[in-house]
Image: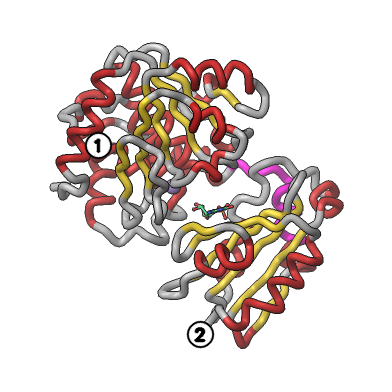
Amino acid sequence: MISELIRKTEIQAAKRLIDKAQSVAIVTHMSPDGDALGSSLAFAHYLRTLGKDPVAVIVPNRFPDFLAWMPGAGDILVYENSAQECNTILASADLLLCLDFNEPKRIGKVAEALCSSQAKKLMIDHHLHPDSFPDVTISYPDSPSTAELVFRLICAFGDFDCISLPVAECIYTGMMTDTGNFSFNSNHVDTYNIIAELVRIGIDKDSIYNLVFNTYSADRMRLMGYCLYRKMQIFPEQHTALIALDRHELYRFNFTSGDAEGLVNLPLQIKDIYYSVFMREDKDKIKISFRSQGDRPVNEYASLFFNGGGHKNAAGGENYETVEKAVALFTSTFKDYFNK
Ligand code: 5GP
Ligand code: MN
């Protein structure tokens, strides 16, 4: 038995928006991960079985190659590459679905077209502090993934039978990636009851694991070795590790989007390291990832010093100076916040 999580009023309000819509555009966050794509593609497949047409999935920028196998990934529109087409779709859709993000800032340049569109907006998300722009918001920060919320919502609509194999594969991918293959945020029995349903539908969870986690390039493995051997700084008193890479270092390892995925988690495998911070120079900013274990929030620190936010144990942020300056800002501030 899977408990009822989503409030009835929200289910009804979401259903009304979907019933009234014919054309739908689904938008998800920048640097889309397995949950962003999993929840978006699952919902797109589901809406198409309801007869909605057209249904578009729009992502702000490229998604990593290890997610390209996902059913429907080939039809995703990348805003960075086709802004005009995306703007037209966003302006003319009846309904905009906002999946796996809580505020316009998280969708970068798509924000303007999304906010100015007259379409109704439905948000389904699990990040703290959802913005007030959507007409209907389904926000459950305790849910381990947005994909899990998508499963619950489709069932709450009475449409379990519409969960086809592609929908199930997309939902499982979101659940698996946002919990680090069920190694964090994954103690609720509902998660496993949902997986049981997905396995019954026919997903091959072992093969999905391989498709997502065992597809690194040799360059990426070497970058990982370089990070751990040459770049990792340990602050034992604060139980903290820091890795920072500038663009020259990334270039040396033929860096492509997705290559940094998961690197921030590695130092947490060290005994007594409870905080990990990873910085890398991007085109126009320094992108920073924060991870922690247990009751040690990093989202507030990310918001205070690095224009970011996120979950208690997984947050992110940005800095607009240089890697050196971002590192200096970090080393001069984190001791007052970490391990207090
Ligand atoms: P990642 O480190 O994987 O990029 O992000 C981890 C989590 O931190 C994301 O799921 C998201 O909730 C949050 N996050 C990442 N970057 C940002 C950011 O720039 N701003 C905010 N508010 N949250 C972010
Ligand atoms: Mn998510």
Task: Identify residue type, mark 2.
Answer: Lys
Residue 220 inside the magenta-drawn segment: yes
Seen from the viewer's position, the closer of residues 93 and 30 is: 93
Residue 57 image position (x, y, % from top left): 48, 25
Identify which residue is drawn at 42% across, 35% down.
98
Secondary structure at badge 2 equals loop
Residue named by callout 1: 153
Q: Is residue 88 left or right of residue 129?
A: right
Please provide percent x and percent y for residue 18.
28, 24
Q: Tell me the residue that label 2 is attached to.
A: 340
Please tell me which residue is depicted at 66% across the width and 77% down the height of the picture: 333
Residue drawn at x 40%, y 36% as measured from the top left: 39
Above-or-below relation of 204 to 216: above
Q: Which range is magenta?
A: 215-226
In this rendering, is residue 259 above or below 80? below
Q: Is mark 1 within 8 Å of ligand 2?
A: no
Please identify the dominant SS of the magenta region: helix
* Relative height, residue 310 to residue 238 (above, below): above
Question: Depth check: 255 or 93 in front?
Answer: 93
**Quick one: 61 or 66, which is closer to the camera?**
61
Label 1 crowd bin: few (<14), some (14–19), many (20+), radius 10 Å: many
* Residue 117 can be seen in this image: yes
Magenta stretch encompasses residue 63: no
Q: For this view, does 215 lie left or right of residue 25?
A: right
Q: Amino acid at mark 1?
A: Leu
- Residue at the image position 74 percent from the left and 65 percent from the top: 326
**Separation of residues labelled 2 and 1 (CA atoms):** 39 Å
Q: Residues within 10 Å of mark 2 (few under 14, many from 20)?
A: few
